[in-house]
Image (tube, rainbow, N blue to C red):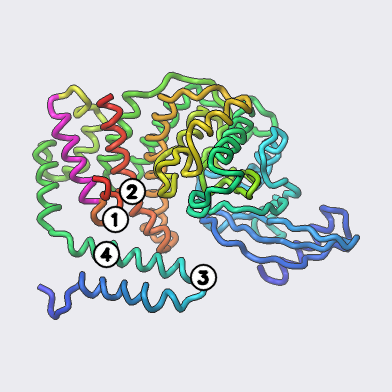
């Protein structure tokens, strides 16, 4: 449990806004790239923090169910895909494709939410 | 660059040019280049003329897969001889004692290269169609360079099957990562299932994309950054240029966000390139996303390992999910077709 409000996502959001609205305009061009990178990093961290832990856990559980491997399900999935276990025409191809799309959506929601704009 | 290096550089340039009165008027670091350092170098010659050059040398951390400066100098010479628009290579110094690392000097070229600016400006090179045609002509001239070449021995033997060689390289790239990447594996597996037949190798630039091509209002002024060049499938360069991840947000213009794809192909064929096979280019476009993703993972690893703490390298890792999203969509579309 966080000890005091405002909590992390809120703090990161206001820190990012301050950086972009108040610091960035006052800087010479040479320093702006670095500040934009810092703002970008804060944005990623804020989205990662705000992500519901359940979403990640539920996905990993689906991967474990698909691969039958509970210890390191993502590694098992990667190996099974390489071996052709989920190629088109195999029984669980569609299930694997759906799962990967959900995984990609979750990863983009943190790293690159703009990518999801087109669905 | 400290005073001692500058003095040694000036002496070396005097000996190389045979101009004992040559003097460095200005030397300043240019922005960009995670791997190389570029310096704007202005000199005053003994006869009173001035010259604008670029000095290109290595950063401390160099990617293992990229060529050194001597190799890049040889590639620039070969490209220039083939009619490719490149900055004219002038002098090569393999001796580390002069400025601390090997370097070469080339003529400075004016123009716009930054990707986001190029794709936003519709008037470069005479407009989008003309720009894409000009880019196609440059690429055809590069691809006219064929093995064997005694002046390019460092490129090694051409691969018998460029697609198979690419797939093997990507598998190694995924195997060296600390985390598994099932979505990238999905892309790799798709490419392995649908690999094109072997093809005769040509010289591929291997980083021929928006951002590495400089323009002015009249045309292409330079094709830059030759350090990844190698023998391969000419469609690999077309796919890298056209891949959605290198259109800098201007997705409707399929030739690198610059102009229409058919104009690119028309320029390519007009300058002697073999008519591109659309299926092969589509394969190499997915391959481009995979390659950019594994490059991004390697760059992030330079930060993660502690070898080179850097916010820019750290953020490069976060490009991967977007590339994965695009790979899944492309694979789905091709499997459904």
Question: Of circles 4 and 3, which is in front?
Answer: 3
Q: Chain of mark 3?
A: A
Q: CA distance from mark 4 to mark 1?
A: 9 Å
Residue, disc 2: B320
Residue, disc 1: A111
In the rendered image, residues at marks 2 and 1 fall on the same chain: no
Give percent across and percent down for residue B12.
Answer: 79, 58
Dot 2: within a 10 Å radius of its alpha carbon, few (fewer than 14), some, or many (20 or more) residues?
many
Check contact, mark 2 vs mark 4: CB within 8 A. no
- Magenta stretch: give its range: A91-107
> B122 or B29: nearer the eye?
B122
Of labels 1 and 3, earlier in sequence is 3
Q: Residue at x 65, y 60 (%)?
A: B39
Check contact, mark 1 vs mark 3: CB within 8 A. no
Is B167 drawn above or below residue B220 in the view shown?
Answer: above
Q: Main secondary structure of the magenta part?
A: helix
């Amino acid at each position: 449990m966080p000890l005091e409000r405002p909590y992390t996502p809120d703090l990161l959001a206001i820190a990012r806004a301050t950086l972009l609205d108040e610091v960035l305009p006052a800087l010479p061009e040479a320093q702006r790239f670095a500040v934009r990178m810092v703002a970008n990093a804060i944005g990623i961290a804020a989205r990662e923090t705000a992500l519901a832990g359940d979403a990640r856990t539920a996905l990993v559980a689906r991967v474990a169910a698909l691969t039958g491997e509970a210890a390191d399900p993502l590694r098992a999935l990667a190996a099974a895909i390489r071996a052709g276990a989920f190629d088109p025409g195999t029984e669980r191809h569609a299930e694997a494709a759906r799962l990967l799309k959900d995984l990609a959506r979750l990863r983009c929601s943190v790293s690159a939410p703009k990518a999801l704009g087109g669905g | 660059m400290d005073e001692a290096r500058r003095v040694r550089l000036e002496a070396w340039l005097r000996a190389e040019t045979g101009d004992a009165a040559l003097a460095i008027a200005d030397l300043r670091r240019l922005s960009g280049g995670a791997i190389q350092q570029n310096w704007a170098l202005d000199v005053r010659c003994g006869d009173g003329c001035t010259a604008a050059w670029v000095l290109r040398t290595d950063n401390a951390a160099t990617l293992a897969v990229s060529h050194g400066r001597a190799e890049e100098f040889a590639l620039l010479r070969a490209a220039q001889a083939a009619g490719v628009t490149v900055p004219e290579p002038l002098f090569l110094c393999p001796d580390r004692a002069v400025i601390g690392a090997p370097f070469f000097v080339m003529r400075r070229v004016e123009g716009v290269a930054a990707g986001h600016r190029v794709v936003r400006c519709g008037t470069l090179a005479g407009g989008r169609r003309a720009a894409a045609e000009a880019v196609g002509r440059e690429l055809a001239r590069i691809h006219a360079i064929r093995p064997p070449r005694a002046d390019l021995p460092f490129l090694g033997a051409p691969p018998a099957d460029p697609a198979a060689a690419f797939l093997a390289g990507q598998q190694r790239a995924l195997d060296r990562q600390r985390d598994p990447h099932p979505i990238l594996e999905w892309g790799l597996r798709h490419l392995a299932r649908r690999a094109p037949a072997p093809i005769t190798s040509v010289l591929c630039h291997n980083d021929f994309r928006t951002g590495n091509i400089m323009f002015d209002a009249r045309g292409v002024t330079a094709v830059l950054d030759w350090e990844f060049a190698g023998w391969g499938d000419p469609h690999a360069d077309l796919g890298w240029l056209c891949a959605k991840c290198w259109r800098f947000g201007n997705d409707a213009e399929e030739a690198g966000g610059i102009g229409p794809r058919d104009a690119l192909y028309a320029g390519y064929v007009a300058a002697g390139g073999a008519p591109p096979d659309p299926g092969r280019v589509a394969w190499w476009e997915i391959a481009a996303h995979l390659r950019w993703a594994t490059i991004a993972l390697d760059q992030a690893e330079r930060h993660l390992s502690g070898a080179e703490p850097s916010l820019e390298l750290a953020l490069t890792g976060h490009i991967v999910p977007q590339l994965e999203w695009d790979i899944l969509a492309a694979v789905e579309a091709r499997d459904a077709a």
